Image (cartoon, rainbow, N blue to C red):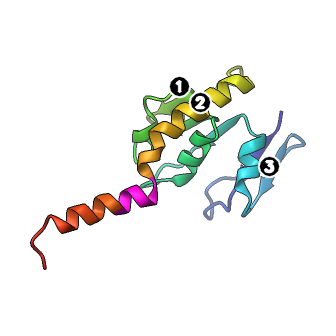
């Protein structure tokens, strides 16, 4: 197995010395390829109002580890199978023996897609338009 770190860290965010079984990809426009070869997605950020990467990883059927406090998207993930939520970084525990079978990932993808279909830009825009239309601001 290999740990792939994706993204540009904030200055001083982490100081990890890469080993042979680790790789760092600063940025990629083809993140879906990384999701496709991954089993697990760890999002250890301590503040993210609404991280779309969590929804992307969820829709790809990945096992997910993230924090609950100050990570907005965690509210959408809390009832999903294969999602592990922690209160803080010190309690985050990655269970490497939880690797998903192909069948489990396909099942996760189907279930999660149904949950997230109501959070598309189109659906959000429609709800916002209805809200604005119902006010007497014009």
Quadrant hosting residue 6: bottom right
Q: Name the element at disc 1.
A: loop
Q: Earlier in the sequence, mark 2 or mark 3?
A: 3
Q: Position of residue 134 (x, y in %)?
A: 15, 64
Q: Give yes or no for contact between labels 2 and 1 (Cβ–Cβ under 8 Å).
A: yes
Image side of residue 51 versus residue 40, left or right: left
Image side of residue 132 versus residue 64, left or right: left
Real-space Cα separation, disc 3 to disc 1, in angstroms: 33 Å
* Residues drawn in magenta: 120-125
Residue at figure coordinates x 13%, y 79% from the top left: 138
- Mark 3 is surrounded, within 10 Å at the Cα level, by few (under 14), some (14 to 19) or many (20 or more) other residues, namely few
76 and 103: which is toward the camera: 103
Image side of residue 4 versus residue 51, left or right: right
Q: Position of residue 119 (x, y in %)?
A: 43, 50
Q: Position of residue 79 (x, y in %)?
A: 43, 28
Which residue matches tag 2? 108
Q: Is residue 52 above or below residue 89?
A: below
In the rendered image, residue 47 lying in the magenta stretch gets the answer no
Q: Is residue 94 above or below residue 19?
A: above
The dot on residue 17 is 3
Res. 133 in view: yes
25 and 56: which is toward the camera: 56
In the rendered image, residue 122 lying in the magenta stretch gets the answer yes
The dot on residue 81 is 1
Q: Residue furthest bottom?
A: 138
Quadrant hosting residue 60: top right
Real-space Cα separation, disc 2 to disc 3, in angstroms: 33 Å
Quadrant hosting residue 100: top right
Question: Which numbered mark, 2 or 1, is in the foreground of this view?
Answer: 2
């Amino acid at each position: 197995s290999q740990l792939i770190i994706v993204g540009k860290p904030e200055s001083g965010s982490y100081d990890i010395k890469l080993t042979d079984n680790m790789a760092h990809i600063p940025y990629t426009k083809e993140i879906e390829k990384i999701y496709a070869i991954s089993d697990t997605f760890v999002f250890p950020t301590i503040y993210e109002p609404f991280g779309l990467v969590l929804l992307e990883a969820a829709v790809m059927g990945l096992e997910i580890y993230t924090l609950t406090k100050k990570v907005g998207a965690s509210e959408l993930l809390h009832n999903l199978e294969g999602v592990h939520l922690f209160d803080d970084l010190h309690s985050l525990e990655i269970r490497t023996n939880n690797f998903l079978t192909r069948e489990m990932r396909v099942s996760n993808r189907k279930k999660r897609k149904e949950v997230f279909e109501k959070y598309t830009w189109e659906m959000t825009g429609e709800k916002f338009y209805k809200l604005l239309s119902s006010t007497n601001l014009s």
